[in-house]
Each structure stands twice: as structure tokens, then as C-alpha cells.
Image: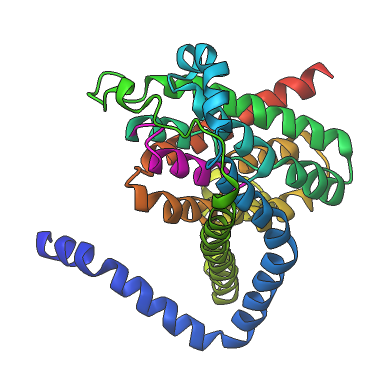
């Protein structure tokens, strides 16, 4: 038995990747359509909305804006979130721009030694969020057909993010970290020179292209994975099994399970069940959690800076719960 467990651990991913390759061949027609849909989604929705934000964040991190923001907000950021004031840029951009801009900004701050590794882990737990355009436009207006629901979900999402940030101020609080005074004023505090402008813009575009292409790859990949799970009947088997255990509706379980894998598809399935307190709460949870697809996108960004993915995973679970709670509270009041 021990030998079997060791072998399973050793060859687990080999088995999964071989199975995935075989599935691509077996369900090639459906997979082709899924890949095309994922590519269209990336090219028409994700690329136009996120790519400019990636360039903007790269440019901002090269200016003295981060330094100025740090000087202004350090007195608030340190006691509330236990991170330096310069980190406020990650919180702000993470809220207004959507996945995974917050993770990108945190990595930029870590790369420039404005924050330490532990501070980056605290930030990564709550600075990567669904954007207002997605929550209000796509979910509220397009899917639910109700702007009020979009506003409720957005307010809940932001409040949940702040609460997670307060909770994570205690993350590795007693662990020895890099001396804060050594990195506190390491951010660029001088204006950009005209002679540097071309190089700075060029580097920002190059870095942004790499990030946006990576996101596109994840979107296509997970579109195909969901297609394989549906075509092979695995998704139906899992949903039926959970339905027998919990008694929860198959339609709800299908939306939750799909959303756990990939956010947009899951939210689409949940909202298609109509407007009810339950569907709004489930949507709120999925928006807070973000899905495995986004988690792996974030992991691909933070891995080069050796930032642990654990606080992100814990933080998103917690944010989903907080978001669900705030949504229920707001619905109960109004």
C-alpha cells in the first residue's frame, strides 16, 4: 500500500497529462469549438480590458507615484493591513481593474524591493479581485438583467476584500522578515526623465504582452477542460453523486462545480437559474473565490518572485464567505 501511494504521488501528474492528451484526441470536435470560444473570449473581452491596465500598472510602478502614495497612506496602511503605504496602489488597482492585475502589481512591488516576501503574501490574499466592469456590466446587467443586483454584489465584494486584508495583517506576524527600514524607501522617488521614456514604455509593453498571453492560454485551456468534463460525462457523474449526498439541486451543483473550476462559465450557469436570494448568494461566493483558473493565472505571475500561493487560496475562500455574508446582510436590509 505504501509503495502504491508513493508511486501515485510520483506519477500523478504524468497520468493526468497523458489522460488530458488522450481526451483531446477522443473529443477533438467539441474541444476545437471550446478552444475557439475561449480564444474569442480572450481576444474580444479580456485583451481589450486588461492589456491597457497591465501597461498602466507597469508605468505607474516606474514613476514616483508609488512613493508619494506611500508617504500619504503609510499611517493608515500599516496599522490596518500591516503593509507599507506603497502597497495601497495594489489594493486600488486590484479593485478597479479585475483579475489578475492585483497580483501583477504585488509582484512589481516585490521585484522593486518596495515590499518584502511576507508583505507580498499578505497582499496577494486580497488585492486580486473581480473588476467593477465584470460585476456590474456582465453579471448584474447582462446575466441577471438587474443593475441593483450588480451594485449589491460589487459592494459586498469590496467589503469582503477589505475584511480579508484586515484578517491577513496577522499572516506570519511573528516570523522574522526582512528589515522593513531597509526596503521602505527603496521605491523610485525621482521623476522620470524624457530620455528614459522610450525605454520605460517599451519594457512596460513587453512585460504586459507576456502576462496577457499567459492569461489567454489559461482561458483556452480551461475552456477545453470544461468541455472534456462535460462531453465525457464526468461532470454529470460528480453532480449526481453530490446531489445524492446533499440533496441540493443538480442545476445549482453544476453551476457551483463549474464556477469552482472557471468563474465566468459557473456564474453564467448559476444566473441562468433566475433571480433568487440563493442564486445571488452563490454568485457572490463565486465572484469572491474566483475559480481555479484564476488561481493558476495568479500562480504563474507570482511564481517568479517565489511568493507562496497558500495565502491567496485561503484568502479567496475567506473572501467568498465574507462576500456571501455581506450580500445576505444587504439583501435582508433593503
Q: Please name the residue shown 37% across and 52% down the image.
A: 303
Residue 94 versus residue 28: which sits nearer the camera?
94
108 sits to left or right of 330:
left
Provide residue 114's location: percent of width, then percent of height.
41, 32
Q: Against 160, is 220 above or below?
A: below
Number of numbered discs on residues: 0
Q: Please name the residue shown 48% across and 19% down the image.
A: 81
Q: Please name the residue shown 54% across and 31% down the image.
A: 66
Find out whether residue 107 is within the magenta segment.
yes
Read off the magenta span. 99-116
Q: Against 320, is 51 above or below?
A: below
Provide residue 76's location: percent of width, then percent of height.
54, 13
Provide residue 254's location: percent of width, then percent of height.
63, 56
Q: Please name the residue shown 37% across and 36% down the image.
A: 113
Provide residue 221's location: percent of width, then percent of height.
53, 70
Q: Against 33, is 288 above or below?
A: above
Amino acid at each position: 500500500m505504501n509503495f502504491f501511494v508513493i508511486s501515485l504521488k510520483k506519477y500523478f501528474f504524468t497520468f493526468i497529462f497523458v489522460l488530458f492528451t488522450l481526451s483531446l484526441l477522443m473529443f477533438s470536435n467539441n474541444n476545437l469549438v471550446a478552444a475557439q470560444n475561449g480564444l474569442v473570449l480572450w481576444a474580444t473581452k479580456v485583451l481589450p480590458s486588461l492589456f491597457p491596465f497591465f501597461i498602466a500598472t507597469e508605468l505607474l510602478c516606474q514613476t514616483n507615484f508609488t512613493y508619494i502614495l506611500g508617504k500619504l497612506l503609510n499611517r493608515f496602511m500599516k496599522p490596518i493591513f500591516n503593509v507599507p503605504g506603497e502597497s495601497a496602489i495594489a489594493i486600488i488597482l486590484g479593485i478597479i481593474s479585475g483579475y489578475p492585475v492585483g497580483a501583477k502589481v504585488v509582484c512589481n512591488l516585490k521585484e522593486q524591493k518596495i515590499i518584502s516576501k511576507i508583505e507580498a503574501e499578505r497582499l496577494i490574499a486580497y488585492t486580486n479581485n473581480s473588476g467593477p466592469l465584470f460585476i456590474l456590466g456582465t453579471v448584474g446587467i447582462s446575466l441577471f438583467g438587474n443593475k441593483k443586483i450588480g451594485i449589491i454584489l460589487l459592494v459586498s465584494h469590496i467589503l469582503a476584500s477589505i475584511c480579508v486584508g484586515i484578517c491577513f495583517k496577522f499572516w506570519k506576524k511573528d516570523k522574522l522578515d526582512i528589515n522593513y527600514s531597509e526596503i521602505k524607501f527603496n521605491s523610485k522617488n525621482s521623476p522620470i526623465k524624457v530620455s528614459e521614456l522610450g525605454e520605460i514604455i517599451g519594457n512596460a509593453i513587453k512585460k504586459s504582452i507576456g502576462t496577457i498571453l499567459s492569461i489567454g492560454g489559461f482561458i483556452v485551456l480551461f475552456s477545453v477542460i470544461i468541455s472534456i468534463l462535460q462531453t465525457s460525462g464526468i461532470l454529470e457523474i460528480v453532480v449526481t453523486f453530490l446531489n445524492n449526498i446533499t440533496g441540493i439541486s443538480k442545476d445549482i451543483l453544476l453551476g457551483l462545480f463549474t464556477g469552482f473550476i472557471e468563474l465566468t462559465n459557473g456564474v453564467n450557469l448559476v444566473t441562468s437559474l433566475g433571480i433568487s436570494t440563493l442564486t445571488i448568494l452563490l454568485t457572490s461566493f463565486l465572484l469572491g473565490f474566483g475559480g481555479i483558473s484564476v488561481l493558476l493565472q495568479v500562480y504563474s505571475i507570482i511564481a517568479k518572485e517565489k511568493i507562496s500561493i497558500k495565502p491567496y487560496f485561503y484568502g479567496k475562500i475567506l473572501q467568498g464567505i465574507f462576500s456571501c455574508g455581506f450580500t445576505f446582510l444587504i439583501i435582508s436590509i433593503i
